[in-house]
Image (cartoon, rainbow, N blue to C red):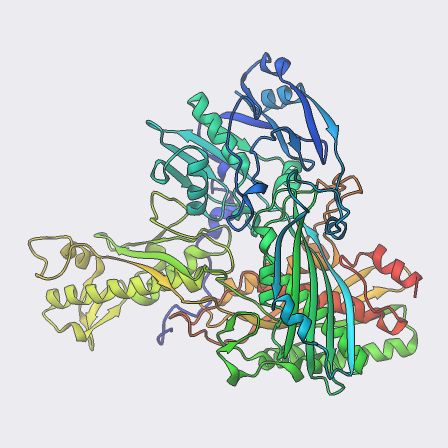
Amino acid sequence: MAASGSILGNPVQRKEDPGLLTGANHYVDDLDIDAAQMVFVRSSEAHAEITSIDTSEAESMPGVLAVYTADSLPMDAFQGFPMIDPGFNRPPLAAGRVRYVGDLVAAVVAETQSQGSDAAEMISVEYSSLPIVSDIEAALSPDSPVVWEGQESNVCFAHIAPEDEVQDASDPFEGADAVVSERIVTQRLAGVPMEPNGCVAVPGDGEAMTLYLSTQAAHSMRDALAPALGLEADQLRVIAPWVGGGFGPKAACYVEYIVAGKAAQALGRPVRWTETRTENMLSMVQGRAMVMNTELGVRNDGSIVGLRANVVADAGAYPVIGAILPLLTGMLSQAVYDMPVIHFKAHTVITNTTPIGAYRGAGRPEATQMVERIMDKAAVAIGMDPAELRRKNFIQPDAFPAALQTGVTYDSGEYERALDAVLDASGYADLRADQQARRAAGDSKMLGIGVSSYVEITAPVGLHIEYGSTEVHEDGTASIRVGTSSHGQGHDTAFSQIVEGVLGISMDDVTHYDADTAEVPSGAGTLGSRSLQTAGSAVYLSSHAVLEKGKQLAAHLLEASADDIVVAEGSLAVAGVPTSSVSWADIAKLANDDAARPSGIEAGLMAEENFDGTDSTFPFGSHVAVVEIDRDTGEVELLRHIAVDDCGTIMNPLIVNGQQHGGIAQGVAQALYEHVQYDDDANPLNASLMDYLVPSAAELPSFEVSNTETASPRNPLGAKGIGESGTIGSTPAVHNAVCDAVAHLGIDHIDMPCSPQAVWRALQNA
C-alpha cells in the first residue's frame, strides 16, 4: 500500500487533538442556538398502567411554553429496528403503559433548563402497577408474565443454527473424551460516553428542519426520523457536531429526538434536549446482557469435537438492535478454531429494563467470552496448558479464505503467529513458573494468568459499503467527504494521511467533512469497526482518480507525457526532472478553466467513490492478562495486560495503539468492575456514577500492546478494523486469569464482574 517514503504506515500525531485538549470543539450543548429547553418526566415504575397525568400546575409555571403527553402531542409508535415485530413499536411518549424505570411519560418545554426542571417536578402521574419481569432467564419461562400485551411470550427474536431437525439428528460430542459445561454470564453494561446524549431541533423554511444530534450515524438518523416527523428525507438535515464518545449506544435512534422535533414543529422555534448523567444511565441503550449455557467436547489430545450453546439475551423493554445481536454471537461461535460441529440456539426476551443496543463489539465480545472461557475449562479437564489447547485447534493460514459452518467467510489470518508473539512478550513460561512457586509456598498473593485468542468481524451485516470523495481546490488545498462519523477515532488524521500519501498534498491542507447530510450525500456512519477499510478505501480510490486526472492536466502544462508525471511535494513533476513541476493549485485552476482545459477532460478536480468491500473483514489477536488476588480479601489487581492484535495493514500505528489501549480498558472494566444491576422489582440500583463502577486510569496498568499485520484482500488498503478488538480480546483474558488464580483451590468459575466480593465469596466456599 505505502510507497517508499510515504506517510502511510507511519506514526503521525492526530490533527484532532489540539481542539480536544483545549476545549475549543463544540458539542451539541455548546452550539450557539437560541433554543427552548426540553425536560422529560420519566416513569418511576418499571411496569404499570398510567391512570392519570395532571399537568395543570406545570403549564402555569413561569417560562413554560408547553407540556406534552401522548394525548396532547400525537406521534406514531416507533419501530426500533427493522427485523423486530412491529407489535413491539414504541410510543415516543408512553401511551397508557410504562415498561421500565425511565420510560418517557411527559415533556416540558420552557425558556430555561431550570424552569423546565421545576415544572416537570410539578407534574403528577398516578400508576397502577403490573407484574414485573427483571430476570432474563425467568422471562423465557412459559409461566412468566408477558410484558407486551397481545404477545404470546416475551421472546422477540430467535436464532437457531443449524435448524432444530439437524441438531436433533447429530451429536456434537460424539467421540469426545471430555465434555465441559458452564453457565457464562456476560453482564449488562452502560456505555457511559463522556458526553451524554442530546439534540437541538431547528425548524427551517416551510416544513424543513435541521437536527443537531450527538450521534454516530447522521444519515441513518435522517432516514429514521424524517418519516417520524412527517418529513421527506430531503426536508431533514442531520448534523453531528463534535461527539464526545459513542461506543455503539450513540448509533441508536432515540425517541427523545422525535419528541424534540415534534415540539419544535408545534412551537415554531428551536428546541434543545440535553441529557443528564442520571438520564443517560436510565435511557441510553445498554449492552451485553446474555446468559450463555455452553458445552465443549474435546479429545485427550486436545482436538475439539464440538460446541453446543444455548443463549438467552435481554432486549430490555423496547427491542432495538440489541435484540438481534445473538445473530452475531452465533456467527462468531466458531472463533479461531477448527470445530467440526456447532449447535447454537439463542432467544432474546423482553424485560422491564432499559433497552439493549450496540456496545463496543456488539455480539462479538459475547462469542469470544463464551468460547474462550469454555476453552480454559476444557484445558483443565484434559490437563493441557490453555495456550497449547488453542494452538492445537487454530484454523491454519492455508485454509483462507475460510468458509465456516456459521455462515461467514474469514478473509485472512495467522492465529498462531499472534499467539506466539503474545506468549513471548509476556514471558509466559516464566509466569507459569512463578505461579507454581507461589502455590507451593502457599503465598497469600495468588497469581493468575489468562489467555484469550479471538477473531472479530468488522464491517458486519452489510456495512462493507461506504461513500468517500476527494477534491483539490484552486488554492492547492484538498477536501474529503466521507459517510463515516468521527467521535474520537482519528478519522481526520487517517483519511488526510491517505490524501497526502496519494497526492502529496500536506495532510494539514486537507479539510475533512463528515456527519452532515447536506455536505455528504450518503453514509452508514461509524459502527462495526469499519471506517478505514470502507471510507478510507473510498478516499484512497477517489484520490487515485484525482491523481490520474491531475497527471493529464499536469502533462498538458509541462508539455510531457502523462506516463512520466509523478507526485512531488504539493505538486506533480516530470520523473527525473524535479525542477519541471506544477503545483496542485495551478492544476486545479486549469481543471476549472473551460477555455484552457484540454478537450475531453471534464471540469473540476473531484472524484467520488461508493466503495464496496464485498464482505466483512476479520481482525484477530491474542491477549495475556496477569492478575494477583489477595486470598484474605478477594481483591483483584491487574498486574499486566499484553495484547497482540492484527488489524491487517496498519495506516497509523499511533492511532492503532490508542484504539488498543482504549478498547482494553473497556474490556478490563467488564471483567472486574462494571455491572448495571436491578432489584427484583426492576428498579435500577446504580443509575449514577456514584454507584456504577467505572475504573479510572489509576486502577489500570500501562498496557503492553503490539501488532502483527495480515493484510485483508477485501480492500486496497489491506485494512481491518481495530476499534473493538481490544475490548473483545481483553475481557476473557482477564476473566480467565481470575479463574486461573483460584483454580488450584477447586474453584472452577466465577461470574463477571470478578469484584472483591464475588472472589471472596468463592474463596469462602472453596
The quadrant of the rendering that contains the C terminus is bottom right
The quadrant of the rendering that contains the N terminus is bottom left
Q: Residue at x 57, y 38 (%)?
A: 90
Looking at this rendering, what residue extends furthest in the bottom direction? 301
Q: Would you say 358 lies left or right of 32 here? A: right
In x, y percent, where is residue 230? 41, 32
In x, y percent, where is residue 129? 75, 31
Looking at this rendering, what residue extends furthest in the left direction? 595
In terms of image quadrants, where is residue 577?
bottom left
- Of residues 509 and 459, the one nearer the viewer is 459
Q: Residue at x 52, y 38 (%)?
A: 78
- Of residues 110 and 357, the one nearer the viewer is 357
Looking at this rendering, what residue extends furthest in the top direction? 60
On screen, residue 232 above or below 590? above
Q: Would you say 762 lies left or right of 464 here? A: right
On screen, residue 645 above or below 187? below
On screen, residue 104 above or below 714? above
- Of residues 329 and 686, the one nearer the viewer is 329
Q: How many callouts does the rendering have?
A: 0
In terms of image quadrants, where is residue 296?
bottom right
Q: Would you say 100 lies left or right of 528 here? A: right
In x, y percent, where is residue 650? 47, 70
Q: Residue at x 48, y 52 (%)?
A: 17
Q: Residue at x 9, y 61 (%)?
A: 598
In x, y percent, where is residue 16? 46, 52
Residue 393 at least partly seen: yes
Residue 727 at least partly seen: no
